[in-house]
Image: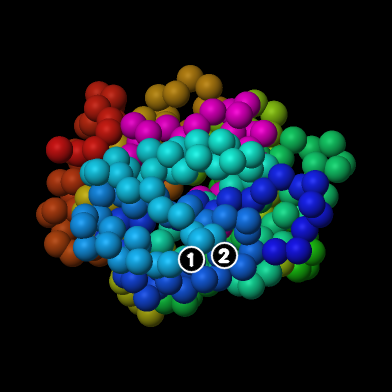
């Protein structure tokens, strides 16, 4: 990657858990061309995946193997700690099934540096991502009052401010991580990026969408089709974490009431939608109800 020699390194952190190897290979090859180093944190996939990783044979791609699945946040934190030790100025986070455009990092970095030069404390910059199975690219969003609104892309050069970003593909400032703190490991999976983005905002940092940056990223499982429209689908277990972590978020005193109301209403709609249209209904209902209960109790971490 052709960059000013004085610029601090950029490290890509890929969280993997039983990855599809051809998909992961595409990601690693695309990422390595755009950053100084790629670090794959394997979340307890087992000896077969470990052997494959160790045989990957690219000196620019390193691997960290965790003995068990500690969750997305813990894996990200392990990667961030190693990137910090290597003097990284930014990390860019990836899920194992993401595929960045060839100019992704350059476009994200241009937005981050441009905002920083104007005096903005930048937390993170993220791309528009495309899930080809869904009808529309998910929009950048923010809360205004008690409404969730779209943050429009008026041109490829626009960079709207948002409340948070989807973690995969996000270029995160190490200075912001040092000031704001790490990802909350007790969330395990889901709402990790939302919580960190809102926490960063509460401490004076800002997140931005880069309309000219793009990345392919699959959101959830095979979409649910209702009246010809496609909606993201998740497993009952992921719905447990989604509901539990959302309720946990609403209990945090630092989170603005307006945001709690806006997101809480969306959660009610999601609960109703997936109870009706996801299969098997009873399992989705049971796991979301359990998530609601555990969120109220503050019972966090990995569901045993």
The residue lying at 81 percent from left, 54 percent from top is: 4
Q: Image check: 93 left or right of 153?
A: left
Image vertical order of residue 271 relative to residue 196, above or below: below
Quarter that holds the N terminus: bottom right
Query: Residue 159, how many percent across, how many down?
Result: 74, 55
Q: Which residues are magenta?
A: 165-192
- Residue 39 left/right relative to 19: right
Q: Residues within 10 Å of mark 1 (few under 14, many from 20)?
A: few
Give the residue furthest to the top.
Answer: 253
Indicate left or right for 102 with 237 as reference.
right
Circle 1 SS class = loop
In the rendered image, is residue 281 in sight? Answer: yes
- Which residue is under mark 1? 58
Q: Residue at x 79, y 52 (%)?
A: 5
Residue 111, horizontal then vertical, whole percent: 76, 54
Can residue 172 be seen in the rendering of this structure? Answer: no
> Cα distance, mark 1 to mark 2?
9 Å
Front position among marks 1 and 2: 1
Circles 1 and 2: CB atoms closer than 8 Å:
yes
- For disc 2, the marked residue is 32
Going 18% across and 64% down the picture, which residue do you hit?
279
Query: Does the segment drawn in magenta span residue 190?
Result: yes
Establish if 30 lies above or below 192: below
What is the x, y in percent for residue 87?
64, 39
Nearest to N terminus: mark 1 or mark 2: 2
Choose between 272 and 117: the one closer to the eye: 117
């Amino acid at each position: 990657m052709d960059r000013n020699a004085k610029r601090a390194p950029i490290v890509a952190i890929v969280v993997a858990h039983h990855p599809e190897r051809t998909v992961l290979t595409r990601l690693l090859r695309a990422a390595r061309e755009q950053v100084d180093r790629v670090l794959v944190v394997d979340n307890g996939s087992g000896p077969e995946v470990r052997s494959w990783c160790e045989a990957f044979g690219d000196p620019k791609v390193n691997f960290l193997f965790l003995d068990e699945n500690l969750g997305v946040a813990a894996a990200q934190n392990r990667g961030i700690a190693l990137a910090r030790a290597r003097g990284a100025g930014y990390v860019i986070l990836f899920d194992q099934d993401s595929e960045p455009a060839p100019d992704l990092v350059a476009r994200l970095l241009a937005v981050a540096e441009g905002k920083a030069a104007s005096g903005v404390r930048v937390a993170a910059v993220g791309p528009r991502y495309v899930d080809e199975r869904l009808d529309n690219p998910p929009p950048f969003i923010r809360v205004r009052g008690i409404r969730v609104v779209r943050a429009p892309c008026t041109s490829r050069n626009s960079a709207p401010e948002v409340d948070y970003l989807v973690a995969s593909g996000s270029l995160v400032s190490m200075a912001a991580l040092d000031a704001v703190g790490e990802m909350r490991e007790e969330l395990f999976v889901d709402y990790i990026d939302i919580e960190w983005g809102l926490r960063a905002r509460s401490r004076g940092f800002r997140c931005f969408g880069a309309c000219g940056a793009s990345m392919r990223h699959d959101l959830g499982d095979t979409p649910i089709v209702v009246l010809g429209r496609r909606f993201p689908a998740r497993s009952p277990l992921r719905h447990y974490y989604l509901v539990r972590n959302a309720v946990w978020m609403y209990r945090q005193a630092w989170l603005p009431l307006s945001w709690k109301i806006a997101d809480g209403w969306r959660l009610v709609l999601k609960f109703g939608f997936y109870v009706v249209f996801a299969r098997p209904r009873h399992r989705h209902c049971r796991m979301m109800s359990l998530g609601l209960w555990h969120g109220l109790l503050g019972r966090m971490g990995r569901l045993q």
